[in-house]
Image (cartoon, rainbow, N blue to C red):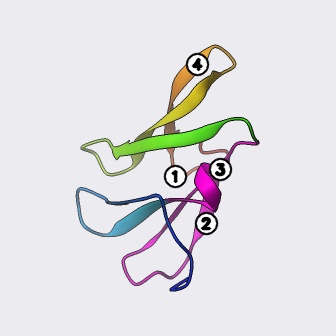
Amino acid sequence: MASEKGLALRVSPDEGRLALIADEGHTVSVMSMAGEDRREIYRVAPPYTIGNLRWYPNGQSMLLVVWPGIREKSALKCDYRREAAC
């Protein structure tokens, strides 16, 4: 992962996990602080991109902003613990 360029990297409120926007803004992954147990939780295809993400205070969910709006939505709430996170 060291050679991969992320567009955004956010630390969870409990400082136990990282969320990463990667793949030119097309994927969001969650992993441990050590970079282990990485799991892709959301992917969009061009022309859409994931422009930003923020953790909810509970540290279990995050808000993703997608440009341009996908399916009439430009923001999605995702729970990384679930198989279908978003």
Q: Quadrant of residue 86?
A: top right
Depth-wise, is mark 1 or mark 3 nearer the camera?
3
Q: Residue at x 31, y 41 (%)?
A: 56
| Residue 5 tag number | none
Q: Residue at x 75, y 40 (%)?
A: 46
Magenta residues, as a range? 21-45
The reply, left or right, for residue 58 in relation to residue 70 is left
Check the image and name the residue furthest to the top: 72
**First reached walking from the N terminus: tag 3 or tag 4:** 3
Instruction: Decide whether residue 70 is among the magenta residues.
Output: no
Mark 4 surroundings within 10 Å by alpha-carbon count, few (fewer than 14), some (14 through 19), many (20 or more): few
Q: Which residue is mark 1?
A: 80
Can see residue 24? yes
Amino acid type, label 1: Tyr
Depth-wise, is mark 3 or mark 2 nearer the camera?
3
Look at the numbered discs 1 and 4 and tell me whether their residues touch, using CB distance below 8 Å. Answer: no
Report x, y in % for residue 65: 48, 33
User: Distance of mark 1 from mark 4, alpha carbons?
Assistant: 19 Å
Name the secondary structure under disc 3. loop
Amino acid type, label 4: Lys
Q: Is residue 16 above or below residue 35?
A: above
Depth-wise, is mark 3 or mark 4 nearer the camera?
3
| Residue 26 tag number | 3
Report x, y in % for residue 13: 23, 56
Q: Which residue is mark 4?
A: 73
Name the secondary structure under disc 1. loop
Look at the numbered discs 1 and 2 and tell me whether their residues touch, using CB distance below 8 Å. Answer: yes
Q: Which residue is mark 2?
A: 39
**First reached walking from the N terminus: tag 4 or tag 2:** 2
